[in-house]
Amino acid sequence: EYSSGDIIGKSGIEASMELALHGKSGSRSMYVNNLGQIQKIIEETEPVAGDDIYLSIDLELQKGIYYLLEQKLAGILKKSFRNEDYVCRIGGDEFAVLMLNVSSALQYLVEGKIAGLRASMADGADGLPSATLSIGIAFADRNDPGEDIYVDCDSALYRAKAAGKNGHCYY
């Protein structure tokens, strides 16, 4: 039984274990005067805490899943771009895609590719968890270019990350 102010788990382990975690709310019935001061408590029920849940992390399993997600992303990137484009892993979980002969006039093309990448990474049909993508974009014909297109793209990436998960920014 829930009240309007209750906080409930909406995703992950909290959502799947909500009934066990929730417990029971307490209640109090009372008489108050016109100033809102309690005059008499009629009935009181103490709250009952929900169950505790203990989680453990299998580091090797976590590393394996992370590796599989990187491989999935690399495969999706390779399929999503043209043969003349360069898809490169920079390090860790960062990739770069250099699209040749694509100017800012083709921004709609880049937006479409980003939407496709996000949909593919969110699809859990392969049994892997969904993943979000933060993306920085810099066109060769960008306004006020910095010293290097890679540095400008990286700057846009960190602005996207600062704005929250699954975003993208243009330099």
Image (cartoon, grey):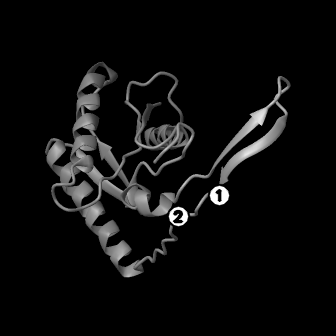
* Crowdedness near tag 1: few (<14), some (14–19) or many (≥20) residues, C-alpha within 10 Å: few
Number of marks in the image?
2
Residue carrying label 1:
46
Q: Quadrant location of residue 168?
A: top left
- Asked if residue 33 lies left or right of residue 92, the reply is right
* Amino acid carrying mark 2 in the image: Gly
- Mark 2 near mark 1, Cβ–Cβ under 8 Å? no
- Residue 160 visible (yes or no): yes
Residue 111, position as x, y percentages in the image: 29, 29
- Residue 93 visible (yes or no): no
Tag shown at residue 50: 2
Residues 142 and 154: in front is: 154
State the residue at coordinates (52%, 24%).
144
- Asked if residue 2 lies left or right of residue 140, the reply is right
Task: Tell which tag, 2 or 1, sits nearer the viewer.
Answer: 1
Tag shown at residue 150: none
Residues 2 and 73: in front is: 2
- Asked if residue 166 is positioned above or below residue 170 in the image, the reply reads below
- Asked if residue 99 is positioned above or below residue 74 in the image, the reply reads above
- Asked if residue 39 lies left or right of residue 81, the reply is right
Distance of label 2 from label 1 (alpha carbons): 13 Å
Residues 41 and 152: in front is: 41
Q: Give SS at disc 2.
A: loop
Residue 46, position as x, y percentages in the image: 65, 58
State the residue at coordinates (33%, 52%).
131
* Amino acid carrying mark 1 in the image: Glu
Residues 164 and 37: in front is: 37
